[in-house]
Structures are given as structure tokens and as C-alpha cells.
Amino acid sequence: MEGAYSPARAPVLILLGPPGAGKGTQARMLEERFGLVQLSTGDMLRAAVAAGSKAGTEAKAVMEAGGLVSDRIVLDILADRLSQPDCAKGVVLDGFPRTTGQAKALDALLAEAGQQVDTAIALEVDDVKMVTRIAGRYTCAGCGEGYHDSFKVPKVEGTCDHCGGREMKRRADDNAKTVMSRLDAYHAQTAPLIEYYAEKGTLKRVDAMGPIEEISGQIARLVAAATA
Ligand code: ADP
Ligand code: ZN
């Protein structure tokens, strides 16, 4: 049947890396090139904060301090989103899992559906440079395309290349002070996941310090090979 969903072939990909490594940028690339659904727990949490939901109210202060929101809240939000029908196309998880508890819960959740994590891609970067990257970044309010004051400016100033929108926004937690806490949280709680996926044999490492297109090319080749 044309267009029929074939669960065995819908990939589950994970992007790992510190804040500023480019997970969101590369997740969007994978969405466009491979028709995957980008699942960003950061975006979901920001939406919950904006909506003023119970989870959002609880998450707000932790996010502003650059800490990690509790596994319970994140897993609730993620499981709910993952159960929606569009995710059957395959997903790229961006910013999740971030703790060993989340990684194990994800494995259990996928196992229930007869699935597993296919590839975990670790974006390897120089921490020190992440502070400048984050402090200069902003996104299009209309479509979410990411930009940067020094590394990726729109072709026409103030206008989104992608959707033509003219409203750009910067995240409340993208300041030098919060970034340090986010980097600490990454090293303490998330970096151990690199070993977790290496042991399972699903880890691929990508040098993510070069030009965006080059990194995208490398990741696209990895994903094409993994989903062939
Ligand atoms: P970045 O990776 O650039 O720090 P995100 O948008 O992924 O940005 O996350 C922003 C904030 O949202 C994090 O600092 C954290 O407080 C919270 N967050 C996002 N995903 C998770 C998660 N999986 N577990 C716990 N907290 C999360
Ligand atoms: Zn846009």
C-alpha cells in the first residue's frame, strides 16, 4: 500500500551534545531531509511554561537557573508526544534523554512498541566556544529556524530565510551566566549517556565544530546508512 507506515523502518534517532552544540539545527535538517519528526523536550517545556500549565509552572524556575527539569515531568511530556500518530514516521530526539533515568525509561517505552533507539549521534564540541555560540543565537518566531549574530545571519537582515517572517526571538536562558550552569548539568548528568549508547553499540560521534553544512552532510550520511 502506498505510503503505508512500516514501523520496523521508522527510525528513532537521538542527538547528544552540550547546549549550543547544534542539536536543534541538525534535528531540523533531519526533519527536512528524512521526513522525521523533531521532538525537542526544551521546546515542549517552553510551550508548557508559556501555557502556564502545572508542569510548566514547576519547570520554569529550574530552566531559568540552567538546571534539569525532573525526569517525571519530562517523561510525562515526552511519552505523551511520542504516542501521537505523526511520530510513526520516525523521530529525532533533540535534548532528550538527558539523564540515565530518562534513557532507561525511553528504552522501556520504545520496547513496548517493539522499537529501540537506532542511532545516538554525539555532537562533539569545544565547551569554551559554546558560551559565545549561545549568547549570540536567536530563532525565527514564525518557523523556529535558528540564526546567530556571527555565524549565521539571515540573507536579508531581520527577515527569516526560511519563511520570510520578520519576528526574531531570543531565549530567556541564553545568557552567559545560565549557560555555565547548563554546561555543568550537561557534564554531570548527560555526558554519561555517551558511554551508555557506546556500550549498546548505537553511538556515532561527529565533530561538530566545523561549518553547519559540513556537519549536516556527515550526519545525513550516517542516518542514510543507518536507515537503508
Ligand atoms: P539546550 O540544549 O540548548 O540547553 P534545550 O532547549 O534542549 O536547550 O533545553 C532548555 C532547558 O530545558 C534545559 O536547560 C533544561 O532546564 C530543560 N530541559 C530540556 N530538556 C530536558 C530534559 N530532557 N530533561 C530535563 N530538563 C530538560
Ligand atoms: Zn522563519
Image: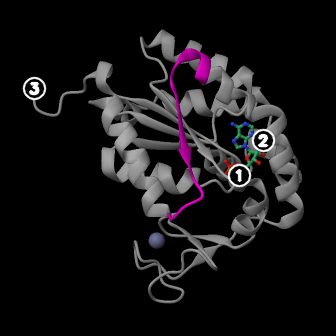
Compute the Cα span from label 3 to label 1: 42 Å
Check residue 186 in the rendering and tell me which mark sits there, or answer none: 2
Which element is circle 2 on?
A: helix
Report if residue 216 lies within the magenta region: no
Q: Quadrant of the N terminus?
A: top left
Quadrant in which residue 76 is drawn = top right
Nearer-the-camera pick, 81 or 116:
116
Q: Quadrant of the C terminus?
A: top left
Q: Which residues are magenta?
A: 198-211
Check residue 1 in the rendering and tell me which mark sits there, or answer none: 3
Does the beta carbon of the residue at mark 2 sit less than 8 Å from ligand 1? yes
Identify residue type, mark 1. Answer: Pro
Does the beta carbon of the residue at mark 1 sit less than 8 Å from ligand 1? yes
Residue beneath label 1, please? 19
Q: Would you place residue 116 above or below residue 157 in this image?
A: above
**CB within 8 Å, label 2 to label 1:** yes
Q: Who comes first in sequence, dot 3 or dot 2?
A: 3
Check residue 98 in the rendering and tell me which mark sits there, or answer none: none
Frontmost of labels 3 and 1 is 1
Q: Who comes first in sequence, dot 3 or dot 1?
A: 3
Q: Residue 7: image x %, image y %?
A: 31, 21
Q: Who comes first in sequence, dot 2 or dot 1?
A: 1
